[in-house]
Amino acid sequence: MSEPWLHIVGIGEDGMAGLSPATRAVVEAAEIIVGGDRHHRLSDAVTAERVSWPSPFDALIDMLRGYRGRRVVVLATGDPLWFSVGARIGRAIPAGEILYHPQLSAFQLAAARLGWSLADVETLTVHGRPVEQMIAFIQPDARLLILTTGAETPARIAAFLAERGFGASPMTVLANMGGADEARFDGTAESWDHEVPAFNTLAVDCVAAPDAALLPRVPGLDDDLFRHDGTMTKQEVRALTLAKLMPMRGALLWDVGTGCGSVAVEWMRGARYARAIGIEPRADRRAMAAANALALGAPRLELIEGEAPAALDGLDAPDAVFLGGGLSAEVFTAAWARLKPLGRLVANAVTLESEAVLMELHARHGGQLVRLQAARAEPVGRFRGWRAAMPVTQWSLIKR
């Protein structure tokens, strides 16, 4: 195993004084120190070659590899493996070549200031990421700690909360924690008007009004929460479909014939960092899917114009595939060939022709074939009666 040559050091607002003696010695012995302007300012007494973050940032790994054999320190804020640069470096450089030196994270400091148990909160980041992704975590009585991306971000999050009936939620912004310029700003989502420093940690204690929108992360959101043209996987069938697709952390779904994106959006909401690619030939439906993704906290939904199987070429291999539109034996064959081992495939059919395709595929490949039908009570004159939705034939299987 190679000797560690790269040290990734977490540093706080108290600078070098806040480091342990052993970590301080590592920084003082460095030949090269890589970091942002703030990191260099916090360690400016150390004599070493100073290197700023590269632009574009993706060039960082190649730059670090070029320093192999020298004593290199990368400075990061707090814990370098918690929503920070350390994880990115660790995916590209062998673990035996790196030593990590964590400092208290912003989450730990914020929890201590508020008296919150970290085991009972959701820790999120929207730093350099779409702010809308936090929407999926707005739940009654949830506590959120969020690394923000700029001075305006808390106000945007306050608007998300107020729009969904969580305007009474207390919000606290903490900035420069542990330093001489530490600052705290308190308020509620519905009346938030503070000007805050650009880099901060936001704490939200979610308080739901009686008419608040309930958006659980388990599948089966109300159809009315989606923009659609009537052609969509309806709530009851969608819940069963997602149960068979099994959203998992970081897993990728191909949603073939995505329509308004209801299945893809709920897949991404169902597990941390789950990804989805929606393939849809119609521009109006792709626009609806994009709007639904933003409104419901899945802003990273990727939408591709085209029809399967041709549109599947060049895509990352999926962990799950949903065939909701454009079903054919050719599309199944192409998707099945790319599906990863233990991948899940679910196909829904509502027409006799597509059902016949499923019957034939089931006979050849096995899996589970079920008939789904739901009926909802609706007015019939002065009374109520059951109005049945079209039955859905669902075929599902796991790639072994």
Image (cartoon, helix red, strand yellow):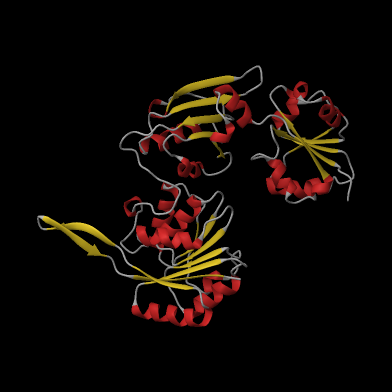
Of residues 36 and 116, which is closer to you in this image?
Answer: 116
> Horizontally, is 235 left or right of 279 in the view?
left
Note whether 230 is above or below 67 in the view shown: below
Residue occupying image coordinates x 57% and y 19%? 183
Q: Is residue 338 visible?
A: yes
User: Residue 214, how many percent across, how many down?
Assistant: 37, 43
Whole-percent x, y for residue 337 in the image: 59, 74
Decide: is 223 above or below 209.
Answer: below
Residue 384 percent location from the top left of the image: 16, 57
Q: Residue at horizontal 39%, vertical 78%?
A: 355
Identity of the residue drawn at 66% across and 21% down: 178
Is residue 371 shown left or right of residue 382?
Answer: right
Q: Is residue 41 above or below residue 317?
A: above
Return the residue nearer the eye: 300 or 236: 236
Determine whether 55 is above or below 364 in the image. above
Q: Residue at x 75, y 23 (%)?
A: 18
In this view of the protein, can residue 56 be seen by the observer? no
How many numbered circles are shown?
Answer: 0
